[in-house]
Amino acid sequence: MYRIPFSALLLVTLSNAQSLTGKATYYGGNENGNACGYNDLEYATFPFGYSAACGSDVFNDGYGCGKCYKITCIGPYGNNPGCSCDSSTPSVIVSCMDQCPECATSHFDLNPKAMERIVGDGLAGTCGVIETTYERVSCDYTSNIKIRAKTGTSAYWYGLHIDDIAGNGAVSNVEIKSSGSSSYDTTCDKSQGPSFWICNG
């Protein structure tokens, strides 16, 4: 097994959230092999099985992966009298775990569990598209951050995945220093795809 001793400097920032108007659809979900490179979706702990595919500035070429949003059902999107929000749980917090290429910034493609939570019982299919408000919120992970080496990593090529980031939910910059070094001389970015960080230096 190839192992790299290092310490990583992760830059995370969470800007002040504001509630904005948007819409939500839903799709089958993609818990494995999604565009963000996550292995699985946690059900027993945060995010409790709630995820979304995000697009445009929210997905941000993969730099938006892991960010969390509170999605609140306002009502049907357009004329759909058979659609209504759940009066008890009209809101859900989702983690952005996949890409929705056709989605605008204000459009979240929810997984079935998330859509079913915020619309009336059994109405996910009837609603199809709903009007929402959305806002960026903190991710309530309680476990330690996880850093995984990407498949194919070697002494000459290093890629990594970063999971379960509490608070901000996503990372904007990664710098690495070798064990015993005083400087962070290796930088990582997503220039080779949204699902992982490629490190050079």
Image (cartoon, rainbow, N blue to C red):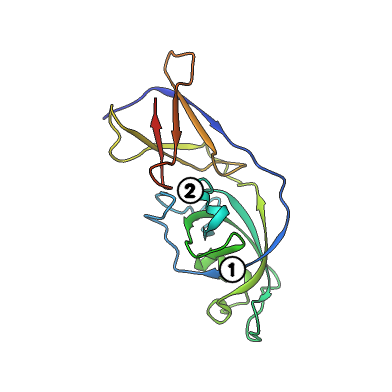
* 13 in relation to 58, above or below: above
Tag shown at residue 69: none
* 136 in relation to 75, above or below: above
Secondary structure under badge 1?
strand
- At label 2, the amino acid type is Gly
Measured from the top left, where is residue 69 in percent x and y? Answer: 62, 55
Q: Residue at x 59, y 68 (%)?
A: 24
Tag in front: 2 or 1: 2
**In front of the other: 179 or 174:** 174
Measured from the top left, where is residue 120 in percent x and y? Answer: 63, 77
37 sits to left or right of 45: left
Where the N terminus falls, by quadrant?
top left
* Corner quadrant of residue 84: bottom right
Q: Residue at x 48, y 61 (%)?
A: 100
Tag shown at residue 24: 1
* 191 in relation to 133, above or below: above
Mark 2 to mark 1: distance in Å?
Answer: 20 Å
137 sits to left or right of 190: right
Disc 2 residue crowd, few under 14, some 14–19, many 20+, Cα 10 Å: many
Where the C terminus falls, by quadrant?
top left
Secondary structure under badge 2?
helix
- At label 1, the amino acid type is Ala
What count of labels does the image hold? 2
Measured from the top left, where is residue 6 in percent x and y? Answer: 42, 23
Q: Residue at x 41, y 49 (%)?
A: 37
Q: Residue at x 52, y 69 (%)?
A: 26
Tag shown at residue 62: 2
